[in-house]
Every structure is written in C-alpha cells, then in structure tokens.
Amino acid sequence: GRDLIEKIMKVQGTWDNADSHQWWCPYRHHFISRIFVGMIATQLINEHLSPLRTTDSVDAALAFMISQGVTELPLIEQKQLYNYVRLQQLSGFSKEQSLGDAIAKNPFPPSAMGQSHLYELVPMLAANELSILAVTDADGQYQGIIEQKSINKLIADVDGDDEAHAGM
C-alpha cells in the first residue's frame, strides 16, 4: 500500500524527496494534467462487473463469479451495500441457499464515496484485504465496482509514461 501511494504522490509532485524536482519538469505538464483526470472513484468504476444480490443463490453466485473471473464481489440488498462475497467462502454453503441467508450483513461494509480520490481508495483496499471496492453515493446507494488491478494498471501506465519521459 505505501509503495503504491508513494508512486502516486511522486507523479503528482507531492512526495518530498531528492527527485521531486523531476516531477514538475515542463515537458511533463501534459502528463501531470492527465494523471489528475480519472483518479476519482466514479471515474474508476468497471462498467463490466455487476454485484451479487442477497436473493441470488450460492450456486448462481459461484457460476457468475467464475464466469467473470473474479474471486470477490459486493453483495447488495435493495441497492444498499450489504457485504462482500468471496468465492472461497461459498464452498461451505448449500448451493440452494440464498446469499442473504448465507452471508451475514456487515453494518459498516467498506466502500468508497463517489468523489473519493485514489489516495483514499488504495489504503481502504489494503486495510480490508479486498481486490475490489464498491462505490456508493451519499445515501449509501450502490454505484459500481472499482478493481485493485485497474488501479495497479493506472499506476503502471503512469510509471511507464514517467520512464519514457525520463529518456527525453
């Protein structure tokens, strides 16, 4: 988590070290401007992933998660975040059982507010040992899913751009 935050802060010129002057070089102006766009939770939502619902059966959830290639997904009830479901925990339940009966409600499930910045998302994912994070609005209504691997790709792209510009 700390290394990832350090990389982001270096790109944005907020990390205080000997190399910090490089992050504000004029040829990087377009790069610095670009990195600020897309760092808000609502802009990082994966449109291809859907949450599970408390009315889904364990069997349907297993099949869906495997087909989507994910190991965890948010669980919602009436558009409110209920909890998270991990693929490994489903194996211990009856396949006909509903997720609402199988998975306990979390009164405070971790989620990102729509305007949360990337700086807030990375520690939240790490602290809760999640690879995905639900995004909710001010009323707690489910908005979408952010994947850790998307954040990693964003950081890798930033590092790649940085290395390319370093050779200028």
Image: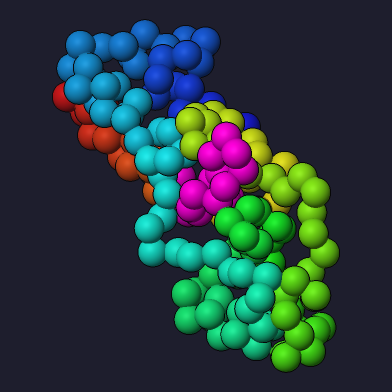
Residue 134 in the magenta stretch? The answer is: yes
Q: Quadrant of residue 94?
A: bottom right
Marker count (numbered): 0
Tell me which residue sits at (61%, 69%) in the image. 53
Left-right relation of 135 to 44: right
Q: Quadrant of the N terminus?
A: top right
Q: Give residue 48's position: percent from left, percent from top.
A: 38, 64
Q: Which residues are magenta?
A: 133-151
135 relative to 79, above or below: above
Q: Residue at x 64, y 36 (%)?
A: 123
The residue at 62%/43% (across/down) is 140
Q: Nearer the viewer, residue 97 or 24?
A: 97
* Location of residue 58 by image quarter: bottom right
Q: Provide residue 81's location: percent of width, then percent of height.
A: 65, 53
Question: Is residue 97 toward the left or the right of residue 1 in the image?
Answer: right
Residue 47 in view in this figure: yes
Kindly tell me whether residue 148 is visible in this rendering. no
Q: Position of residue 159 (x, y in %)?
A: 36, 36
The vertical placement of 126 against 95, above or below, is above
